[in-house]
Amino acid sequence: MASHRRNHFVDPHHELHKTWYGREDSHTCDICQIKLAGLVGYSCHACNIDVHQQCADSFTESISFFLHPPHSSLKLRRILPSDPPRRCNLCRWPCPRGTFAYRCTECGFDVHPLCSILPARFPSPSHPGHDLCMVSSQSPGYCSACHHSIDSCEYVCSCSSLRLHILCATNAPAGAAQRSYGPVIPGYNPANQGSYYGLVTPAYNPAIIQGSYYYGGPAITGNNYNTGSGHQSFLTAIAKFLLKTGIHVGLSEVLSAALSDAFNN
């Protein structure tokens, strides 16, 4: 008979209990931040932890990430109530207290678990035969889709001035239709990264991980930093992107639930 309890690194002090969440349940997963309603998960009432079964199975305790220097791995850690406000270094949306994020204690690099599985590159919708590559922003500039400033990671095309916020890139047609106000540095090769802003070691140059993806979705920017309806739109955009690309089939049930919830609301 299958056990309804399991040990898991998100709670080193207690066993997690298998939980069936009702369709009207308001709990959200502390790993992916998507609602648990109608799905199976694990919980610890003593620590106020709730996670999808798929998230518990799919996300590992530590990862390496191509835009993060290899001085240490990123560990999935809970953002504590006493922690200062944290934002994902990729999308710039908050990492809410009580949820989990991949963190580097040496340099302060943070990334949402869902953002950690975004592709390093995917085919550019405006330049057939070219890829948009995720890079660390090297110079001040503006997003070609929403025209807000870019201060963190972005998707760029090496053959044009196209620059997109990580989240705006989920709306590929809109991004492709705009002209960039901030051209890509001449001669810039997206296979080599340049300086990081703030927390990450300058002049680190990791190679881009190869891949081939295409997706589209609703326009969204990371400039409206809140955890209300905009935060749910952010989750919906990421979920739609990941489903279209088929990057992580192990999370298909969770991602489909995010889209279903957005449609019903």
Image (cartoon, rainbow, N blue to C red):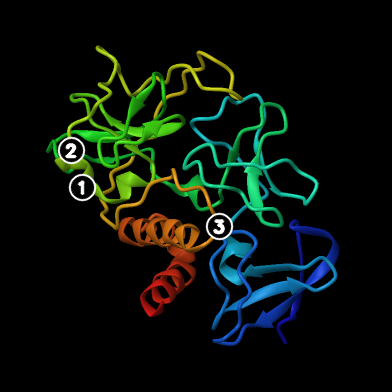
Q: Are marks 1 and 2 in contact (CB under 8 Å)?
A: yes
**Residue at point 61% right, 49% down?**
95
* Residue under numbered circle 3: 227
Q: Is residue 189 above or below residue 62?
A: above
| Picture quarter with the N terminus | bottom right
| The disc label shown at residue 178, or none | 2
The amino acid at mark 2 is Gln
Q: Is residue 196 above or below residue 203?
A: below
**Picture mark count:** 3
- Precedes in sequence: disc 3 or disc 2: 2
Which secondary structure lies at badge 2?
loop
Residue 169 lies in quadrant: top left
Residue 50 point in image, percent of width and height: 69, 69
Q: Gap between marks 3 and 2, in whole Å?
A: 28 Å
Disc 3 or disc 1, which is closer to the eye?
3
Comparing 175 with 122, the one in front is: 175
164 relative position to 124: left or right:
right
